[in-house]
């Protein structure tokens, strides 16, 4: 009798199992879990500091005004900016080549002319880049450079003329100025130029034109707290995938970060980093305008202008560019390379080598006014030295010598004189002329 109903029971059980399977399937399809909303991932902020415009980076370190019987000069940032702001309103046209074989003595003759103002740049400036500062009405701006810019208003019946001179290449270009407001030109250029300090030309026979402050100068000795920027921010800015970067402690003052493509060495004592991507190294000679714009854009991309850095030097053959730290209109030099400058070597489509400090100058806690001897006194002391050829000196300028107090995390900027000879900036020390800082041009 039990066997009679066995098949019926099996059929009923099978039907129940199939029904349950269908119910579970429908439940899964229609199930909507009540998840907590996911927190949106924060993107990494790689803007370390602010971006800067071309006219903030490419600036003259000195302006000289030549009058009929007087030489005046200034490194004052406020006065320099006022003149440059006025120049930004001008219409410039008729850019043309005057000469392509000027030597330094030919250039000196132009610089000595009265009724003009000369802007001194430490590095050769590509015209195609400075066109971002001064608007030139010319579609055929050449791939040429200059390091002296002269505003000549000697012809009183005509508008001023601008001369662009290169001591490196010997090129001399000229262009015409159309003034929107002559009164504004007289007030913001001529009058400001006549308010400069008195300078004196140093007589060196046929040597290039050199003018220095005639009287002792007053400069502030500054002491800053050193604010460290976390190297991890540069890691995040420089490596394509920061999460793939490996960190290695080399010793008590050195760390290394790296992935399969690049590495970054960090000196934690002097706060300097050295980033290298070997695969993009290039041996091709760079186009000057492209090289300078690429290196500026690269630093702007991660807001790397942590203090006031100005363009100082470029070598298209080695694809090398240097930006110098400035404080109160004066260059800052250091015995330790890479602590008062940013240097880049440009590779194939991107940076190959990048060396820079990762600190910023914080509060100036102890400004003290100091008096330096006149530039004339410094020049005479250098002339009397038996250790160097005075006629080879290209420039004499005040600057700052960086002293680091590692224990107290202080940076002291000591005012002193520097002179440029054979591509090197040397610190003037009366008791030891060849002692001090030497900054080579790569």
Image (spheres, rainbow, N blue to C red):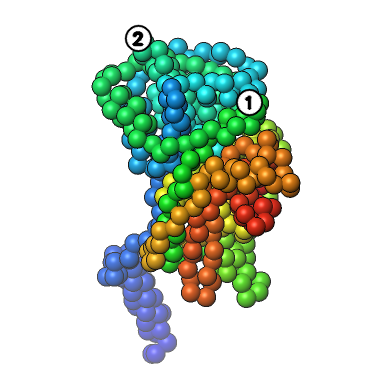
Q: Quadrant of residue 170?
A: top right
Horizontal and vertical percent for residue 74? 43, 39
Seen at 67% across and 56% down, the residue is: 432
Horizontal and vertical percent for residue 177? 38, 17
Seen at 65% across and 74% down, the residue is: 251
Residue at the outermost bottom position: 1
Label at residue 125? none
Q: Nearer the viewer, residue 20 or 330?
A: 330
Residue at the outermost right position: 386
Quarter of the picture containing the N terminus is bottom left
Give the residue at mark 1: 104
Callout 2 crowding tier (Cα within 10 Å): few <14, some 14–19, many ≥20: few
Above or below, comparing residue 115 to residue 318 in the picture:
above
- Work out whether residue 1 can be spotted: yes
- 21 lies left or right of 336: left
Q: Quadrant of residue 85?
A: top left
Q: Nearer the viewer, residue 402 or 16?
A: 402
Callout 1 crowding tier (Cα within 10 Å): few <14, some 14–19, many ≥20: some
């Amino acid at each position: 009798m039990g066997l009679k109903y066995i098949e019926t029971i099996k059929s009923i059980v099978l039907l129940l199992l199939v029904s349950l399977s269908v119910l579970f399937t429908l439940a899964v399809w229609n199930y909507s879990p009540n998840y907590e909303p996911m927190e949106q991932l924060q993107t990494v902020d790689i803007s370390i500091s602010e971006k800067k415009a071309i006219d903030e980076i490419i600036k003259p370190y000195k302006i000289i005004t030549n009058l009929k019987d007087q030489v005046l000069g200034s490194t004052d940032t406020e006065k320099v900016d006022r003149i440059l702001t006025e120049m930004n309103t001008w219409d410039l046209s008729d850019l043309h080549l005057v000469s392509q074989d000027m030597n330094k003595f030919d250039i000196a003759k132009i610089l000595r002319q009265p009724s003009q103002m000369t802007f001194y740049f430490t590095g050769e400036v590509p015209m195609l880049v400075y066109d971002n500062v001064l608007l030139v009405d010319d579609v055929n701006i050449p791939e040429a450079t200059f390091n002296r810019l002269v505003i000549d208003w000697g012809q009183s019946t005509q508008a001023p003329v601008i001369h662009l001179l290169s001591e490196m290449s010997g090129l001399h270009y000229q262009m015409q100025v159309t003034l929107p407001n002559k009164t504004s030109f007289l007030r913001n250029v001529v009058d400001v130029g006549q308010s400069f300090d008195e300078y004196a030309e140093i007589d060196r026979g046929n040597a290039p034109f050199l003018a220095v402050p005639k009287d002792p100068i007053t400069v502030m000795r500054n002491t800053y707290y050193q604010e460290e920027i976390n190297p991890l921010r540069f890691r995040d800015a420089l490596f394509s995938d920061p999460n793939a970067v490996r960190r290695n402690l080399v010793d008590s003052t050195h760390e290394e970060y790296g992935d399969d493509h690049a590495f970054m060495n960090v000196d934690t004592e002097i706060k300097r980093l050295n980033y290298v991507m070997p695969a993009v190294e290039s041996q091709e000679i760079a186009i000057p305008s492209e090289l300078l714009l690429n290196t500026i854009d690269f630093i702007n991309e991660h807001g790397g202008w942590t203090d006031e850095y100005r363009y100082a030097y470029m070598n298209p053959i080695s694809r090398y560019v240097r930006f110098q730290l400035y404080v109160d209109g004066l260059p800052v030099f250091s015995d330790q390379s890479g602590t008062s400058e940013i240097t880049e070597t440009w590779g194939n489509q991107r940076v190959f080598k990048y060396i820079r400090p990762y600190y910023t100058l914080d509060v100036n806690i102890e400004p003290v006014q100091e008096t330096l001897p006149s530039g004339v006194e410094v020049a005479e002391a250098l002339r009397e030295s038996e250790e160097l050829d005075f006629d080879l000196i290209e420039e004499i300028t005040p600057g700052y010598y960086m002293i680091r107090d590692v224990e107290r995390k202080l940076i002291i900027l000591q005012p002193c004189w520097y002179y440029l000879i054979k591509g090197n900036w040397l610190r003037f020390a009366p008791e030891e002329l060849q002692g001090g800082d030497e900054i080579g041009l790569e």
